[in-house]
């Protein structure tokens, strides 16, 4: 946890600018597609039949998904050996580049500590060279701390309903948007559009963020 604490402490936020706090997997990166390719190289199949990770991994021909321990091992290995083999979400880099001319951008991602350098390299390679906070667990507390550093409005973007709810509970003044970049996952993702606007297209999401931050 020391590195994550240091990330948050060291993260520079312009106190006079609005702030965009954004997740990585299924928001900036097409994680499930990359992870599916990775598990395929290890002799498994990723079947997108629910909004889950480990419960979608199968041995070929089997109907029972892989157990959590084996799934977690593949996940950890992915961040060692496959974490840079992700495609960016369409339009994400251009949208953030445009928003960053008038707002601060911080990337808040849950990732294992051993994947820190891989994640940082991927972000820089694909045009997401913004301050990075590696988190573990609920994102409400770190999002609240980041938002408190600016006098301007803040927005938070994530694909996971529990993380959106965490931010709503901890820092209700932060405007929340749900984004799911993988078309296969979109109909499966739990949502609460009455509490968190759901926008799965980056051009449309950029417009909604700009309206909130700059209007």
Image (spheres, rainbow, N blue to C red):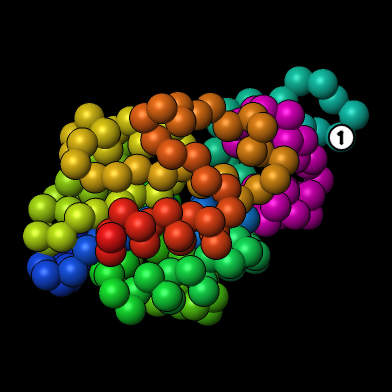
Location of residue 76 in the rendering, given as x and y in whole percent from the top left corner: 53, 49
Taking the image as shown, residue 147 lies to the left or right of residue 179, namely: left
Q: Which residues are magenta?
A: 32-56
Residue 113 occupies which quadrant of the picture? bottom left
Residue projecting furthest to the right: 61
Total marks shown come to: 1
Question: Considering depth in this image, is 65 or 108 the residue closer to the camera?
Answer: 108
Question: Considering depth in this image, is 111 or 140 the residue closer to the camera?
Answer: 140
Location of residue 20 in the rendering, given as x and y in whole percent from the top left corner: 31, 60
Query: Which quadrant of the rendered structure holds the C terminus?
Result: bottom left
* Residue 157 visible from this viewpoint: yes
Question: Considering depth in this image, is 77 or 195 the residue closer to the camera?
Answer: 195
Residue name at image x 90 percent, y 29 percent: 61
Residue name at image x 20 percent, y 36 percent: 172
Q: Secondary structure at mark 1?
A: loop
Residue name at image x 79 percent, y 49 percent: 40
Up-down relation of residue 137 to residue 86 (above or below): above
* Residue 137 visible from this viewpoint: no
Residue name at image x 43 percent, y 76 percent: 97
Question: Considering depth in this image, is 187 or 61 the residue closer to the camera?
Answer: 187
Residue on which the image places disc 1: 60
The question of residue 8 being in magenta is answered with no
């Amino acid at each position: 946890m020391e590195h994550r604490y240091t990330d948050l402490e060291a993260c520079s936020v312009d106190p006079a600018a609005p702030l965009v706090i954004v997740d990585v997997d299924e928001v900036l990166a097409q994680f499930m597609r990359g992870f599916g390719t990775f598990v395929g190289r290890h002799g498994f199949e990723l079947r997108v039949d629910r909004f889950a990770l480990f419960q979608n991994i199968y041995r070929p021909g089997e109907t029972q998904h892989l157990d959590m321990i084996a799934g977690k091992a593949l996940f950890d290995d992915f961040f060692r050996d496959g974490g840079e083999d992700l495609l960016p979400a369409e339009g994400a880099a251009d949208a953030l580049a445009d928003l960053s001319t008038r707002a601060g951008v911080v990337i808040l991602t849950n990732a294992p500590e051993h994947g820190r350098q891989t994640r940082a390299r991927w972000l820089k390679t694909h045009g997401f060279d913004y301050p990075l906070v590696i988190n573990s667990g609920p994102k409400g507390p770190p999002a609240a701390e980041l938002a408190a550093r600016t006098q301007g409005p803040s927005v938070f973007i994530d694909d996971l309903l529990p993380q959106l709810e965490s931010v709503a509970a901890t820092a209700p003044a932060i405007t929340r948007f749900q984004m799911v970049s993988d078309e296969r996952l979109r109909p499966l993702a739990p949502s609460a559009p009455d509490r968190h606007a759901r926008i799965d297209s980056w051009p449309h999401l950029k417009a909604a963020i700009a309206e909130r931050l700059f209007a």
